[in-house]
Amino acid sequence: MFNGLCPVKTDSLKEICIKRFEGFILSGAFAAGEKLPPERELAKRLGVSRPVVHEALVDIAAKGLVTITPRKGTVVNDFRRQGSVSMLISLLEYHDGKLDARLLDGLLTMRLLVEIENVRLAARHRTDAQLEEFNNILHQETTADHTDIENITQLDFEFHLIVAIATDNLLYPLLLNSFKPVYTNLSGHFFQDSTVVSVVFDFHKKIVAAISDQDEQHAADLMHQMLSHGEERLRKIIPR
């Protein structure tokens, strides 16, 4: 069962071990409920030191992949029950940036629910300082090169982050930041078609106007329209 555990040679042994353990768990090679070999044995099989193995296991334990019990060992968890938000990044890396249908569906559905609530609250609680931040983003968007995917993706993320901050709920921006690698991965695919950039930026202008007017319903309607437009295109182009 552990035949795939072979020595690794890299400058970042801990990270490689983390990815190796994640790969075994996410692929089902290490099944939920299964007890892993002792750290000393894992270290020997991987060709690394025991402290490196321990640090890697502590990392994946923080993500909910395993449970480490002193003097009893390490047991593989069902990540659907114990996994944290950081598991999304691991899943994305395991699939080489590709999302399976269920994960993509879940992400898009959750984004719709969260971001519509975010913009509604932003319209209610936004401050003058936050309106300045919105207008600064809008100004940068007017001069942005629509073929510069990295910059466009960053501007789009910053727009949504300011919306989250303007909710006056500390958890929403933290949640969005936790999803940033997945969010920007999806956006990077979406903005490869530069013709959609002007559509998205136009939505940004209208949403900022609604937030400025503190029109919660209009802001929510606009966010729904923008996200629905994005979802439709993403489902056509995202690698699956």
Image (tube, grey):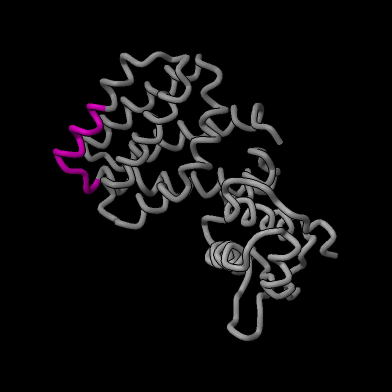
In this view, which residue lies farthest toward the bottom? 71
In this view, which residue lies farthest toward the left? 128
Residue 204 locus on image (x, y percent): 35, 28
Name the residue located 14 percent from the left edge and 38 percent from the top edge.
Answer: 128
Give the total number of marks visible in the rendering: 0
Q: Main secondary structure of the magenta part?
A: helix
Q: Which quadrant holds residue 25?
A: bottom right
Q: Which quadrant holds residue 41?
A: bottom right
Q: Please check the rendered image and state whether residue 92 is part of the magenta-colored stretch, yes or no.
A: no
Position of residue 215 relative to residue 202, above or below, is below
Name the residue located 51 percent from the left edge and 23 percent from the top edge.
Answer: 191
Q: Please check the rendered image and state whether residue 135 is part of the magenta-colored stretch, yes or no.
A: yes
Name the residue located 33 percent from the left edge and 37 percent from the top edge.
Answer: 219
The quarter of the rendered structure image containing the C terminus is: top right
Position of residue 197 relative to residue 50, above or below, is above
* Left or right position of 128 against 203: left
The quarter of the rendered structure image containing the N terminus is: bottom right
* Left or right position of 109 against 91: left
Position of residue 146 relative to residue 96, above or below, is above
Residue 37 locus on image (x, y percent): 74, 73
Residue placed most toward the observer, 148 or 35: 35
Residue placed most toward the observer, 171 or 76: 76
Residue placed most toward the observer, 139 or 225: 139
Segment tinted magenta in the rendering: 124-136
Name the residue located 52 percent from the left edge and 66 percent from the top edge.
Answer: 62
